[in-house]
Amino acid sequence: EAQVTQNPRYLITVTGKKLTVTCSQNMNHEYMSWYRQDPGLGLRQIYYSMNVEVTDKGDVPEGYKVSRKEKRNFPLILESPSPNQTSLYFCASSWDSLYNSPLHFGNGTRLTVT
Amino acid sequence: GEDVEQSLFLSVREGDSSVINCTYTDSSSTYLYWYKQEPGAGLQLLTYIFSNMDMKQDQRLTVLLNKKDKHLSLRIADTQTGDSAIYFCAESYTGGGNNLTFGTGTQLKVEL
């Protein structure tokens, strides 16, 4: 089944404890992206990747890191999480970065930082 | 920067039509999208429209684009309880490829 898989689905952690949210897609997509969803703000892009070893900042990259060593994986790293990073995170991928290449979303990771 | 706005809530009765509205600011938007988010799930692409089109129809869905007013709407005919979800409009901005700017989302509640 074609899908974008994020893990974990739920995560509760404490301020300053490094964490990684994994994202994997099995569709051989070139483009991958991370979003965070907050009430009243919609989805905001954190980082994106056009292809392997190519990553760029989105609208809200502060406090996050990503890597794209393989085509299928695009982990999101929080080196020192803070409470304002409590949010619902989505990974998405698409065939390429052309306008009408539809984005496929994972089911989300709900992160709480205390 | 780009800004996409939607009303937060809409309530309709089953069988009625729903109209979800969206306004955007980037006049160079190339594609505009509607995504649906069901509880506990990610976003699913419903439909999209190219900026040189005024209307697109796909079964129960009708998308209207007023480029002059930068207004996008999604009409759902014969709304069903299964249509209850959050609906996001999104635009692709100049040079952004698949980097979309999303609206705040409209929570659609369908009542019996």
Image: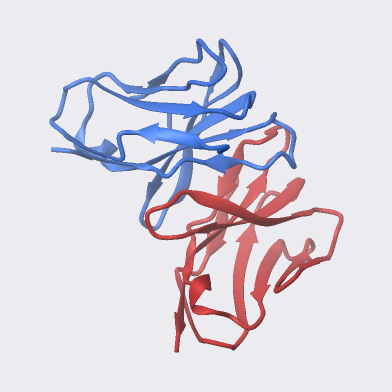
Chain colours: A blue, B red
Can you tell which quarter of the image residue B97 is in?
Answer: top right
Q: Is residue B1 visible?
A: no
How many marks do you count on the picture? Answer: 0
Residue A66, image x and y in percent? 43, 19
Relative to A27, does residue B111 appear above or below in the rendering? below
Q: Pick the residue in front: A64 or B4.
A: A64
Residue at position x 59%, y 88% from top? B16
Residue located farthest toward the front when viewing the structure as drawn: A1
Query: Along the horizontal axis of the image, is B61 left or right of B90?
Result: right
Residue B104, image x and y in percent? 48, 57
Q: Pick the residue in front: A63 or A72.
A: A72
Relative to B36, does residue A31 appear above or below in the rendering? above
Relative to A69, does residue B103 appear above or below in the rendering? below
Query: Along the horizontal axis of the image, is A17 left or right of A32?
Result: left
Quadrant where the C terminus of chain A sits is top left
Residue A89, image x and y in percent? 38, 40
Residue at position x 56%, y 28% from top? A26
Relative to B77, does residue A17 appear above or below in the rendering? above
Residue at position x 85%, y 59% from top? B53
Residue located farthest toward the right when viewing the structure as drawn: B52
Quadrant where the N terminus of chain A sits is top right
Residue at position x 74%, y 65% from top? B69
Q: Is residue A54 visible?
A: yes
Residue A57, image x and y in percent? 51, 24
